[in-house]
Amino acid sequence: MLLVVLGFLVLVAHLEFKGKDIISIEDFSQQEINHILDVSKSMESLARGGSDMLRGKILATLFFEPSTRTRLSFETAMLKLGGGCIGFAEPDLSSTRKGENLADTIRTVENYAEVIILRHRLEGSAKLAAEFSKVPIINAGTGAEEHPTQALIDLYTMRKEKKRIDGLKVAIVGDLRYGRTVHSLAYALALYNVELHLVSPETLRMRKDVLATIKDKISVTEEASIEKIIPQIDVLYVTRIQKERFPDATEYAKVKGAYRIDLKTLSSAKEDLIILHPLPRVDEIAPEIDAMPQARYFQQVWNGIVVRMALLSLVLGAVQ
Ligand code: CP
């Protein structure tokens, strides 16, 4: 009996999100991720109808790199929950321009806001910010390292569209070296029973540290071509070649346009394949695909609002 009670207490403690930083998807168990996805589902009606669940709370967005979806969807999520937003999308208009360091920026903004959303070009910056912050830090993308909230949106979209995550055959295509969303997604998928196919040019293969972690947990193949694997997969996750992260322009020129999903690509795919993309896209998905039933990347954008509503309400303790 004592063991049962202790087990229950451990379970409850395990699912405590209030005050938690969201730095890496590796910090979460499958049980915690499933809980976030369940709360996200419960946010669908609030996203349409509005709520005052977070009235009086303020969200700060500190974006040291460009963004459309992540910043605007976090702000939308907070506004739909009745809270307010402050922040900057252009660091050159902040005191960073005058030489202020990240730690001092965080120790300033924590006085203004109950939660801080940080995007930064440097790997490790979200972790550093969390060490200085009294309020939760949510990693909105750190260099080529991780983008954990995007991975939660990707999982939510898979579960919503395919009614499950376990048993899926997923292909991740594109820039697996510099793309941060694919690192977080690979870690997250490795918590489930999925078959993962990594498709990239030789020079943009999945980072060795990520590969070592996921290969221990799930079946992973590395491929150079989509054609071979497309007939068997359930989810095609396409990513942009991250031009801005290449140290050498000639290396980018060699892989630019390496993959392009078009109607011909889909001709051998399963009828119920879904195509996801964290966006922005450049030329890796032909516009003709947008009208196809397989295209789910703009639904993914909507899902970004509900997942981020869930994360804000959890870390601010409005839901458990
Ligand atoms: N998916 C994503 O991170 O998009 P943004 O760069 O527009 O925020």
Image (cartoon, rainbow, N blue to C red):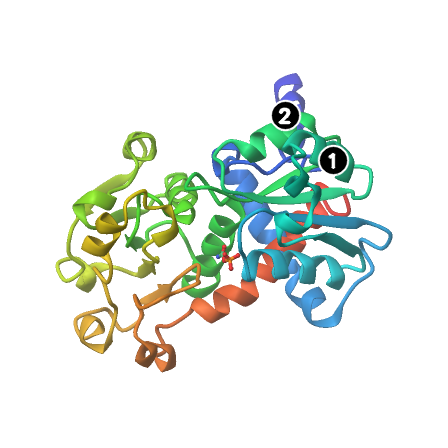
Residue 232 point in image, percent of width and height: 20, 60
Residue 40 point in image, percent of width and height: 61, 56
**293 is higher (above) or lower (below) than 310:** below
Residue that carries the numbered disc 1 in the rendered image = 135
Which residue sits at x=29%, y=38%? Answer: 218
Residue 102: image quadrant is: top right
Select label 1 or label 2 by which is in front: 1
**204 is higher (above) or lower (below) than 26:** below
Residue 145: image quadrant is: top left
**124 is higher (above) or lower (below) than 36:** above
Residue 186 point in image, percent of width and height: 37, 43
- Residue 9 is left or right of residue 251, and the answer is right
Identify residue type, mark 2: Val
The outermost residue toward the right is 56
User: In this orientation, which residue lies closer to the viewer: 27 or 241?
Assistant: 241
Residue 259 point in image, percent of width and height: 22, 62
Which residue sits at x=32%, y=33%? Answer: 217
Residue that carries the numbered disc 2 in the rendered image = 10
